[in-house]
Amino acid sequence: MSEQNFIAHAAGKYIRISPLKARLVADLIRDRYVGEALTILRYSKKKKASAIIEKVLRSAIANAQQKSPEVDVDDLYIARIYVDQGPTWKRFRARAMGRAARILKRTSHVHIYLEERKGR
């Protein structure tokens, strides 16, 4: 799929969630219509990842409506969604006998591309 086929794109960058956890939710809604995807995200058990991806998806829908107002939201589907790893924040936690342990706080970049598919 080339970039020209997409109606809209939205990205959430430097989001404080592990890419592994976000990818589990992204796999649930890949290649689905946006209405169905929003329902899945609303009732998913992975609350934090679902809320983050729902926010990016709503941004992509708004971008599609802004770019072409005649587009029907019910015909939009998620053509491509992927989660990349962002920079990792390194923190230290005090441990026994004066030592320290490294804590890795991972971040993610979420990208969603929408296309229009008629005749659902």
Image (tube, grey):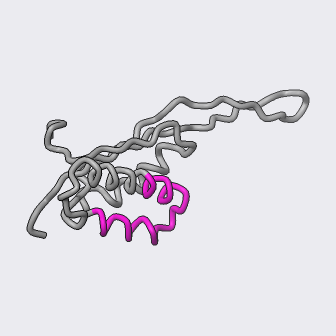
Q: Residue at x 30, y 69 (%)?
A: 36
* Residue 90 highlighted magenta (yes or no): no
Q: Which residue is drawn at 45% across and 69% down?
A: 42
Q: Which quadrant of the figure contains the N terminus?
A: top left
4 sits left or right of 100 in the view: left
- Residue 94 coordinates in the image, percent (x, y): 83, 34
Vertical order, 58 against 17 (above or below): below
Quadrant hosting residue 65: bottom left
* Residue 51 highlighted magenta (yes or no): yes
* View extreme (left): residue: 119
* View extreme (right): residue: 97
- Residue 88 coordinates in the image, percent (x, y): 57, 31
**Looking at the magenta stretch, what is its main secondary structure?**
helix
Q: How many numbered discs sit on the rendered protein?
A: 0
Q: Which quadrant of the figure contains the C terminus?
A: bottom left
Q: Nearer the viewer, residue 71 or 34?
A: 71
Vertical order, 13 against 62 (above or below): above
101 sits left or right of 55 in the view: right
41 sits left or right of 1 in the view: right
Q: Which residue is drawn at 53% across and 29% down?
A: 87
- Residue 74 coordinates in the image, percent (x, y): 23, 67
- Residue 76 coordinates in the image, percent (x, y): 22, 59
> Start and end of the magenta stretch?
34-55
Q: Residue at x 47, y 43 (%)?
A: 19
